[in-house]
Amino acid sequence: MKRVPLRSLLIAVGLALPFSLQAGNTPAAVPATKTPSPKYVFLFIGDGMSMTQVNSAEIYAKAIGSKEVGIKKLGFSQFPVAGMTTTYEAGSFITDSASAGTAMASGNKTLSGIINMDPGKTRKFATIAEQAKAAGYKIGIVSSVSLDHATPASFYAKVPSRGDMYDIAVQLTQSGFDYFGGGGFAQPKGKNKDKADVIDLARQSGYTYVNSREAFQALKPISGKVLAVNATLQDASAMPYEMDRKPDDLSLADYTRKGIELLDNKKGFFMMVEGGKIDWAGHANDAMANISDVIALDNAVAEAVAFQSRHPNETLILVTGDHETGGMSIGFAGTKYATFYDKVSKQTMSFQAFTDGFMKQYKAEHKGTGSFADVIPVIEKTFGLDFAKMSSDEKTQIERAFVRSMGGEIEKNPLENDYLLYGGYDPLTVKLTQILNQHAGIGWTTYSHTGVPVVTFAKGAGQELFGGYYDNTDIYRKLVRLMKLRVNANSTVAAN
Ligand SMILES: [Zn+2]
C-alpha cells in the first residue's frame, strides 16, 4: 500500500507546517533507485569534521614531507562521490551532536541536546539502526568517545537530554545491537553513583564484556553480542587522542576491523563508527590533535574499504561529519596568504595530555611559586615553539595565560573575558596551541560548533545517491530507501 506522506496530509487539512517539517523533507529529494540494496553499510561520522578538517589533514600530510604546495589526499577523500550536507537543527543554524545525530539516524530535525525525540520532547523516533536490526542486519556502534555520548547514542537511544547519560547507557544494554566498541561510559552507575552498574546490566542482557587488548583480540563471532571498552581511557571515558595513543593501545581502526569480523554474516550489517575526538580537539583549538584524529578516522575507513574490496557490489561506505567545530580555517590574519602546516608536527602531545600531565603536576607542586622561566623549556619542547623567534606580544600573551593558569591574576581582572581568551580550558595550554596554530596559518573562530555544511563522501553500492547538496536528514532518507527498510512512522517521508 502506498503510504500518504504526512506532509500532504497536513497540507490537505490546512495545517501550517512547522519549520522542521518543511526543511528539506520533500519526498522528491530522494530519487527512486534501481541499485540493489547494499548488504553491508558503513556510516563513518567525523564529529566536528567539515571540509576544513579534512583538507587540513591533507595539507598536513603533504607539508610534513615536502615544501611544495599541494595536498596528499586521504583514503576517503578519494571516494568517487562527494556531496555537501547542511547541518542546521530545528532552532539554530548551529547544531550540536545530539540534534545532528538525530537528523542522520532518524531523519528528523530536533533541538540541540535532544536525542531522537521531537522539540516538544513527547514523540520518539525510530532510528536507522533499529530499523536495520528489525530487517535482519547485524548492528555495530563504535566511537572513540564514550559509548553513551550523543553521536553513538543517536543510533540506539531516545532521551529528552543528552546529559541523561545513565539512561542512555541503560538503553544501550536494551538495544539488542550486536557490537559496541571504543570508549566507556561517562556515568556507569548514574549521576550519584547509586544505580546498577551498566556493565552488569549489559551482562544480564547477554553481552560479552571485554576491557583488555588480549580479551578484545580473542573475540570471535561465536562471542555473541559484544561490549568492548578500551583498556586505556583518557578524558571523560574516551579513548586517547590518536597523537597520545601508545603503540599497545587499540585504535579506531582496530575497533572497526573487529566489528567487521564479528558482524559479518549472510544477512548483512550496519556499522556506525564515530571519530569523536576530532570535535573535542576542535573545541580546544588544537589543530595537531584534530588532524591526527581525522587521520585515525581515515585509517578506520580503510578497514571498511578493505572489506569492500571483497564484497564490491554489496557494500556501501559513507563518511560524513555531524557539524563543524572550532571555526577552523586555512588562513590566519598574521600569516596572510601563507601557511606552514609542518609547524604543528612539532607538537608532541594533545592539549589534554599536556593539561593532565605537566600542567596538573606543575600546578600542584608550585602553588603560588611558579615561574614562567621554568616552563619555557617545557613549552618549547612540547609545542615546538621557539621563544627567541617569537614576538614580544606573543610572549606576553603566553606569560599572561601562564599566570592565569597558576591562578594568580584572576582577582585582579574580574572584568576580563576569560572565555573569549581561553574557552574554559587551561589558559596556558589553549594559548600555546592557538599561537602554534597561528604560526602555521591555521585560524579558529570559536570554542563551539559552527553552522557551515559538511561533506559526505560515498563509495560502493548506491553511492550515486549521495552526490549533490542536501540536508543531514536526507542521509537517513537515502539510506532507508537504499536499504529498503520500513519507514520510520514518525518520519515525514513517503514510503515510496
Ligand atoms: Zn562538539
Image (cartoon, rainbow, N blue to C red):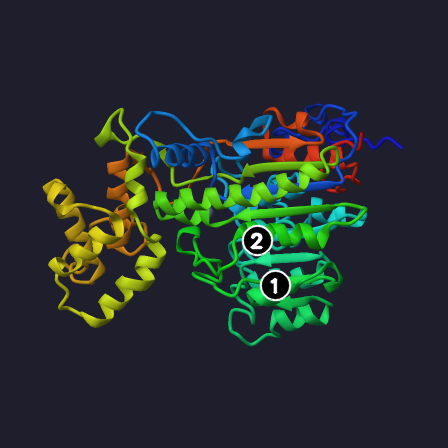
Q: Is residue 418 above or below residue 190?
A: above
Q: Residue at x 58, y 66 (%)?
A: 214
Give percent across and percent down for residue 308: 68, 38
Name the residue that disc number 1 marks. Answer: 216
Asked which secondary structure carries label 2, the reply is helix
User: For the point 35% across and 58% down, which residue is it?
Assistant: 353
Q: Mark 2, residues whose alpha carbon is within 10 Å: few (<14), some, or many (≥20)?
A: some
Q: Amino acid at mark 1?
A: Phe
Res 86 visible: no
Where in the figure is residue 389, as x and y percent of width and height?
A: 13, 41
Which residue is found at the position 23% from the left and 67% from the top?
Answer: 363
Which of the two labelled residues, at mark 2 and mark 1, occupies the earlier sequence position?
Answer: 1
* Residue 357 occupies quadrant: bottom left
- In the picture, the quarter occupied by the N terminus is top right
Quadrant of the snapshot with the C terminus: top right
- Say left or right for 2 vs 471: right
Image quarter of residue 55: top left
Q: CA distance from mark 2 to mark 1?
A: 10 Å
Tell me if label 2 and label 1 are in contact, CB under 8 Å.
yes
User: Residue at left 70%, top 44%?
Assistant: 128
Q: Residue furthest bottom?
A: 194
Q: Nearer the viewer, residue 378 or 125?
A: 378
The residue beneath circle 2 is 254
* Amino acid type assigned to the residue bearing label 2 in the image: Asp
Q: Secondary structure at mark 1?
A: helix
Q: Quadrant of residue 246?
A: bottom left
Residue 177 position in % (x across, y down): 71, 56
